[in-house]
Image (cartoon, grey):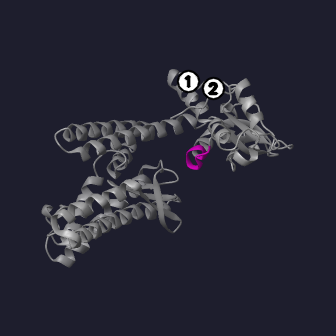
């Protein structure tokens, strides 16, 4: 996730903090300082850090549950409204997703129970006030964990409740249909949050936007995987393209950009192996910074992921999403580049699929390159 800073790693999972979380700390510090001075400000920031420590433990509940099913978690990102654990893949088995989704809220229940035991009293809703420095910190922390448990069970993506709802629906309908239903419910919840936010709570407006976009993205992601399943990578690849040599200069690439419709140019060695990809945006930046005589090998994107022609397009989609590469190479058994897969290819396949919902899939092999799809 952009605008996030890594602060550590646990068991191969990188923990990141979004810059907006740092702004939250600053806001809390100022609020507490106005109410109670420097000591109150320090206590306020300490409380927020403890809350997000609970959020991290919540996310690691998902991580540990996911690992039981062989699903890795590259990173966890802390945001002002909570944490996001990025799973390498979402299990399409309803039972597995249900366990993974419930593991996080279960951690909050355990934390709240332990704090209740230490306090000896039942936490009250009054303890949740972040702007009440006079309230006992353990009491507030216990109640916040109860709130996190309830909030995360709201049936809307990206909250755990949305995934719980999808898992339960998937027992009675297909995974894709369950996702569409759960996403629609999530968008409805987002609309409700937005409506409530119009009456004086701007935070709800932010949450509403976040939930709506997350629900839409989840539905799109599942639809994309469903369409890509069963299609061969070679059937979705650009097979006629112009490539560059490792000896090419930026001026050569610019000429190719002008005379073709390509926006991504593979850099291929004498044996036909893919060395990297030079994008249009990289060309423009390099022209301003280095001039036209710089070698393409100095400005290209390296380590481009590749798939075999007979692999599923779903594998290429997963690589495109996980690696963040501009393209995916299609290589033969000898490692020679025979095609390119771009986000635009995949987007056009989805449009073809949507235009022919009741017919067999009709995939037209791409013969020429066009401009890349921009999300």
Instruction: Let me know if residue 139 is in the magenta part.
Output: no
| Residue 357 in sight in this render | no
Closer to the chain start, of discs 2 and 1, is: 1
Q: Residues within 10 Å of mark 2 (few under 14, many from 20)?
A: some
Q: CA distance from mark 2 to mark 1?
A: 8 Å
From the viewer's perspective, is 35 left or right of 351? left
Q: Nearer the viewer, residue 78 or 233?
A: 78
The residue identified by callout 2 is 363
Q: What mark, if any, has residue 352 been given in the picture?
A: 1
| Magenta stretch: helix, strand or loop mostly | helix
- Labelled pair 2, 1 in contact (Cβ < 8 Å): yes
From the viewer's perspective, is 94 left or right of 196? right
Q: Nearer the viewer, residue 55 or 94?
A: 55
Q: Nearer the viewer, residue 270 or 125?
A: 270
Mark 2, secondary structure of its residue: loop
Res 150 quadrant in image: bottom left
Mark 1, secondary structure of its residue: helix
């Amino acid at each position: 996730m952009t605008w996030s800073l890594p602060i550590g790693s646990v068991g191969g999972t990188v923990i990141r903090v979004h810059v907006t979380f740092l702004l939250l700390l600053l806001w809390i510090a100022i609020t507490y300082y106005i109410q109670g001075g420097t000591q109150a400000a320090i206590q306020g920031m300490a409380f927020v850090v403890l809350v997000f420590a609970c959020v991290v433990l919540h996310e690691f509940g998902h991580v540990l549950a996911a690992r039981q099913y062989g699903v890795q978690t590259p990173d966890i990102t802390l945001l002002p409204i909570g944490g996001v654990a990025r799973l390498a893949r979402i299990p399409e088995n309803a039972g597995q997703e249900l366990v993974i989704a419930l593991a996080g809220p279960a951690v909050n229940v355990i934390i709240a129970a332990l704090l209740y035991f230490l306090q000896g009293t039942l936490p009250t809703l009054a303890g949740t006030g972040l702007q009440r420095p006079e309230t006992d910190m353990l009491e507030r922390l216990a109640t916040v964990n109860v709130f996190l448990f309830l909030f995360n069970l709201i049936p809307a993506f990206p909250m755990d409740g949305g995934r719980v709802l999808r898992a339960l629906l998937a027992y009675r309908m297909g995974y894709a249909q369950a996702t569409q239903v759960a996403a629609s419910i999530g968008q409805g919840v987002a609309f409700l949050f937005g409506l409530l936010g119009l009456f004086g709570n701007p935070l709800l407006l932010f949450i509403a936007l976040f939930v709506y976009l997350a629900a839409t993205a989840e539905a799109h992601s599942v639809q994309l995987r469903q369409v890509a399943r069963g299609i061969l990578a070679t059937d979705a690849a650009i097979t006629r393209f112009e490539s560059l040599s490792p000896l090419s200069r930026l001026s050569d690439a610019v000429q190719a950009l002008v005379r073709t419709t390509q926006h991504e140019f593979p850099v291929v060695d004498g044996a036909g192996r893919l060395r990297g990809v030079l994008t249009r945006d990289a060309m423009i930046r390099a022209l301003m910074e280095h001039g036209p005589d710089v070698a393409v090998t100095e400005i290209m994107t390296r380590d481009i992921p590749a798939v075999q022609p007979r692999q599923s397009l779903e594998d290429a989609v997963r690589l495109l999403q996980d690696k963040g590469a501009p393209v995916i190479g299609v290589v033969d058994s000898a490692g020679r580049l025979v095609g390119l897969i771009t986000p635009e290819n995949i987007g056009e396949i989805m449009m073809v699929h949507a235009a022919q919902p009741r017919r067999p899939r009709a995939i037209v092999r791409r013969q020429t390159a066009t401009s890349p799809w921009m999300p």
